[in-house]
Amino acid sequence: MGQTAIESLHTEICKSILRVQRNTPSNGCRAELGQFPLLIRIQKRAIKFYQHLKASEPSSYHYKAPQCQEESKEGSPLSQLVHRISANSSGHQDRPYTIRLHQIRTKEKDNYINYWTSATKTQSKLQCYSALNRRYCMADYLSCVTDPRLRKTLAMYRLSSHSLAIETGRHRQDLLPREDQTVPTAHNARWRTELHFLTSCSYTRTLETHIFHKLRNTEGL
């Protein structure tokens, strides 16, 4: 899905809230906050405005304006938009459509979640995030963890916005294959992934104890 200027601004705000780097995948940051593209809200408001015009008095300019556009050769862009969205939500392109605002919004969100699910699986930078198998909603730790530094640390590792070799090494010419990126001094050689760093690495046992002691009862990690 291409991004407009307003969508780009929206994702930049999401990254600013999470305090992650600007090159962090946008669809991961949106999902972490449970935010959908602004286009869905814009479409909802357009449909509500269309319904308002159609419910106006037939003698009013509000009612006549879209009617005149619909009768013109070019047609009404607003009517075409509403017809397309309503037809897509019902699944019948050739039948008369009924505007069901809640159904349309739910359908558009479901379509985006399907796109998001397939897109995250193909992004190597979101492999750790995909492994969390989380629902598309605001992550629980964002409201449960009150320490801003700890909250930022969790967001950075969940979204691969960090300086571990698994992330920075992808830009080096001498990058080892993923299966060879191990911790040589560990008793059991494991990949240097975010999950390994936070849960299994002997060098970060103190960090693991400190973080997970505070988050023992926090879901969504």
Image (cartoon, rainbow, N blue to C red):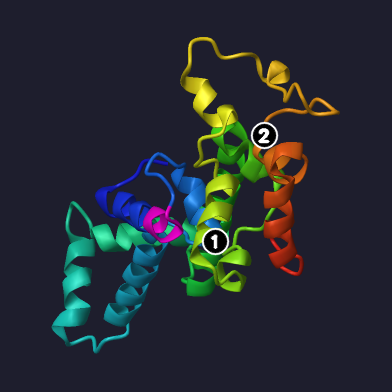
Q: Is the C terminus in the top left, top right, bottom left or bottom right quadrant?
A: bottom right
Rendering quarter of residue 85? bottom left
Q: Is residue 66 magenta?
A: no
Marking on residue 39: none
Please say if 189 is above or below 47. Answer: above
Image marks 1 and 2: residues in contact by CB distance under 8 Å:
no
* Nearer-the-camera pick, 103 or 72: 103
Q: Is residue 2 above or below residue 31?
A: above
Q: Where does label 1 land, which residue?
A: 151
Q: Looking at the image, which residue sits at the far right?
A: 187
**Measured Cα–Cα span from mark 1 to mark 2:** 19 Å
SS state under label 1? helix
Left or right: where 211 falls relative to 46? right
Residue type at the position of mark 2: Thr
Q: Tag 1: Cα neighbours inside 10 Å, few (<14), some, or many (≥20)? A: some
- Asked whether residue 73 is in view, the answer is yes
* Viewer-side residue, 147 vs 30: 147
Task: Write the residue at 46% across / 62% down.
Answer: 86
Q: Residues within 10 Å of mark 2 (few under 14, many from 20)?
A: many
Amino acid type at image mark 1: Arg
Residue holding disc 2: 193
Farthest residue, direction top: 174
Residue at left 52%, top 73%? 102
Write the start and end of the magenta stretch as one range. Answer: 14-19
Which picture quadrant has residue 129? top right
- Estimate the x, y position of residue 160 in percent, counting from the top left: 55, 40
- Label 2's element? loop
The x and y percentages for residue 199 are 75, 45
In the image, 218: left or right of 92? Answer: right
Please tell me which of labels 1 and 2 falls first in the chain.
Answer: 1
